[in-house]
Amino acid sequence: MSDSTLAAHDAHAEHEHPPYQRHHFETMEQQVDATGFAMWLFLLTEIMFFGGLFTAYLIYRNWYYPAFVAGSHQLNIVWGTLNTGVLISSSFTMAMGVWSAETRRKTALVLWLVATLVLGLAFLGIKTIEYSEKIEKHHVPGIHYSIKSFTDPQSDPEVYNLYHDKALPLDMARHTEMYFGLYFAMTGMHALHMIIGIAILSFMIFRARAGAYTTGHVTFVENFGLYWHFVDIVWIFLFPLLYLISRHG
Amino acid sequence: MDHISPVLWHFLIKWLTNFQLYPPEASKIAPQMDALYFFMVLVSLIGMTIVVLLLTSFSILYSKKRHPVAVQIEGSTMLEATWTIIPLGLFLIMFVWGALIYFRVYTPPANAMNIYVVGKQWMWKAEHPGGQHEINALHIPTGRPVQLTLISQDVFHSFSIPAFRVKREAIPGRYTSVWFEATEVGTYHLFCTQYCGTNHSAMIGDIVVLSPDDYKKWLNQSTNGMSLSQNGERLFASLSCSACHNGRPDARGPSLAGVYGTKLTLTNGQTTLADEAYLREAILNPSEHVTQGFSPIMPTYQGQISEDGVISLVEYIKGLNSNDRIEQTLNTTTLLPDGEGKAPSAVKKAAAGPTSATQGMVKQ
Amino acid sequence: MSTIVSLPDQSTATIPKVNFITKEHGILSWLLTGDHKRIAMLYLASITFFFAIGGALAGLIRLELLTPQSDLMATDTYNKVFTMHGVVMIFLFLVPSVPATLGNFLIPLMIGAKDLALPKINLLSWYLYVAGGILVLYTMAAGGVDTGWTFTVPLSTHYLNTNVLSTGIAIFIAGFSSIFTGLNFIVTIHKMRAPGMTWFRLPLFVWAHYAASILMVLGTPVLAIALVLVILERTMGIGVFDPLKGGDPILFQHLFWFYSHPAVYIMILPGMGVISEVISTFSRKRVFGYTAVAFSSVAIAVFGFFVWEHHMFIMGVSTYSTLVFSLLTMLVAVPSAIKIFNWTFTLYKGSITFETPMLYAFGFMGLFTIGGLTGVFLGTTGTDIHLTETYFIVAHFHFVMVGGMLMAFLSGIHFWWPKMTGRMYPEKISQLAALITFIGFNFTFFPQFILGTLGMPRRYAAYPAEFQVLNVFSTAGATILGVGYLLPILYLTWSLKYGEIAGSNPWQATGLEWQVQSPPLTENFAEIPIVDHDAYDYEWLEKKHEREAVTIVG
């Protein structure tokens, strides 16, 4: 460790490193360890991010319980369940993708990744259908928001025939706007994570076709897998909180 | 001294003659608060002196010239424990002392005279129980505890009287309160201290402390003939509250006579104290505040009464002892159209009241 | 048990031909670099730029407050100026100041690593910072924003017509820059330490950054979500913070301060790290009670998460919860007191010299002590009622942020300037600058404590005439302070070309970063060092010199 370090470069060249080992890591193990740890930390950040939303949801649900029940009855449980299925399957295909990368099966990896991509897009497609239903019924918060479905449930026969909800008093009916506000904020943030995931996934498919992840260097696929599963788990919390929790009555 | 510019000279004179380190102590709590404040200043000064003394003496004693060779020391558990425990002890004293004062400032005594204050961009409106309105001013007597019940009509404001050492935020959608007892006659600053938009710095006013006699005079001069609760009574009738809350055996709403200050059991099983905040909420968000045994048929008055109107109603309900007068009103006439002109600010859309009432009562 | 240090002969030192600055040329080699040292330099340039903007805005504020009326500018202009001053200084200067420049440059060098664990993320973090910065500049050009940096709802969501959206997005983006920096530090400190560099051999600078990084990673996302909700409230009207729709504006206060109180520790902890290094080096003595100082950083980080409600004592929160939060605030004050005394006793039986970094460190100790003690005034529920939302609180946080953090930043910049550039800053003029800064600072902010006690509210464009004299003092002090900040910018730039050549270890400091050439190689270490000594081990340094002397003779 003296100042005369001009000859230092040669020392480094002596070792044989795998080509994908970044220059600043001493060993491959250190690299895998560090990037994996970083991903977990990032997910911790994400938990805090969604945590803020969940806190707001829980507080207001506690305050405006009838509005939240009535609001959740407006969600389509069929689409919701289907979407949950789609996401869980996509987690499975993603896990298979990671496995294919680890066992160096290029074709299988590309196929599993494409399957994940298709399922991800399907999720967003179904979400779009659900969103457009809300737009049609004027259940998007803002100046066009309408509380008709809640003050006069029979005007909304589809939902009324399922739940036979009583009309909400006007003040409580107005609080359904808060429910939908949180619904859009939470599912919107989740969808944004899906969109970012799909963009990265497309990039990965492109690289996987060139054989980038089937040479033993699977960190990127593994870490993306963690991200994808995390987004999936967020939905696993969103689905019961938004769709299921008020079904019993 | 002629080389100092006269402007600067004048300036210094002015400063030296008016220099003060703390505002006048004009309330009962002020000397108590100042005692704690000066205790903390003292502790800070001592702490500061210790640090500065140590720094300078070490700098002189152990400068490289005097002390060319450093002696390596690991640390000292004893010393470190000392400067952990002593500050902690001092901070805990301040915590307890401060908490006692905090509780005093925010726990009004039962006999306090209540004045409502509504903050809006960018003025303070004070409503005395006798119906006196003030804008950006507050007249109060000495020697009597005064409770302020604050609310904001728009954004956060903060009602600050430095001479009384009290301050409380006025928050949209909920009542907050603070109390004080003025001790010195005089005029003091009133500031809005929570940033509230363009003219935040113009949201200031005067706190005028009068002797009890002068205060009485002022009350008589400033009255507009209708007290808060009289205004509330008028609203009570015009909004058709009396149609249900009349104390008759077949009434659809609970009797409000003597309801203030009692414990209520709600339909969801919770018990709650019927205070100002509860009454306000029950008017604006009735369905969450239905008393046990009644149906949630009351319409909401959110957006139909101004905060001032709500205050009048609350004040009316607070003082309501029996249902006799309600009964009278119901028997003699339905609405008093000529009453509209007297306090138009209190009723925004009184006419809309009955309409929405019918809407709300359609489904039971 | 003694150490004799002989400074190396500076006249024979040369700047090594190969170093991280000369390795590659061209603007692209900087903009696409993965080298933590180059990214640190990029950060240094960009935060200096934003500091200049924030400083100019501060100058405008002080000029307006020279007279009681709002005569220099209209009140809404004044509101925009102080808002932009806060946004720029907090999110674009104070939060990234020490971590993104010094921390970025030094953490790998100090722990014996070749780079941060995630160089690309590090570069991404700088680009996010720049993107956030450009959006803030756009906001200013488009007419500014006047919410105050605290974005209080419903003012920011329903009552203002200014550029709240672009500011919110800018802070959101800059926030992710900070998250990535913190994440990178944590991973690096966990996984990249050289063999033998155990946790308790880490320099205290690294401990302080570790603590600050935890706050960045766990706190910033909560600010992000609060801003997302503000943006949705403004664009869609989701009602979460709207009292008319049943929303609770207090919830925003909770979410906002859940980040913004820890943010204060994000800003100050790295500065404390700098002070530990500087005090030890210039008294040639190990830091008194290393473990206590290290753990006090972590304690500040942990307690720092549970004190946010002390910003809301007068907002009508439950009286009993204020008790808890006030008590926790008292607990978080203790580690700061421990640090001050430990630094002071580091001087005891040392061999002290008074170069510029040390002068700034003395300034830090004095001003931070005042800043910290006045924090106790505000954390005590009783006195908080009178003092909060006045100039007392303005003075308090400027003592901590400017008197503390900025002093620490300047101390660190001077201390590591020879390492970063290979050249010394001019000593005499920089000592003068340190003195001017200290005097100017006290003139500017001390009168504000009195103003606050007298009740002058913060964020006032116009104020009652009786407060004028103290405001004039404050403005006069600000001009002195301005000179104090301008000088380093000038002479440090000058020294890039004309400064004396520093050599690898001009201060005879013990950190690993001082054992390599200045400026360092791109890969930092020709060979990864094996660490066999504690931090601040001046005997080890002396023996090393003896060994080297023997090698040269032999």
Image (spheres, helix red, strand yellow):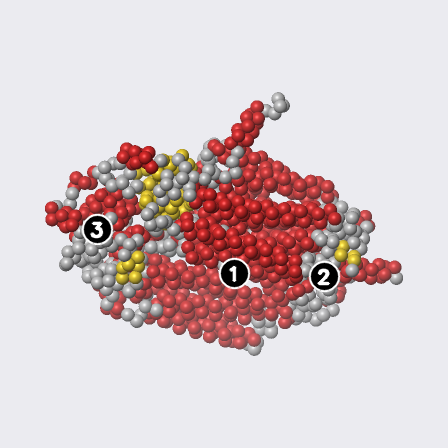
Residue B72 location, x and y as percent? 74, 58
Q: Is residue A82 above or below residue B289?
A: below
Q: In the displayed structure, does residue C549 sit left or right of residue B76?
A: right
Say which quarter of the image contains residue A74: bottom left
Q: Position of residue B52 (x, y in %)?
A: 65, 47
Chain of the residue on which disc 1 is drawn: C
* Three-letter residue code for mark 3: Asn
Q: Residue at x 64, y 51 (%)?
A: C41
Q: Is residue C3 above or below residue B180?
A: below
Percent of width and height locating residue B328: 13, 48
Identify residue type, mark 2: Phe
Chain to which the residue tagged by mark 3 belongs: B
Q: CA distance from mark 2 to mark 1?
A: 32 Å
**Secondary structure at numbered mark 2:** loop
Q: Which of the two residues, C505 or A123, is positioned nearer the viewer here?
A: C505
Label disc, if present, on residue C525 of the rendered structure:
2
Give the residue type at disc 1. Answer: Leu
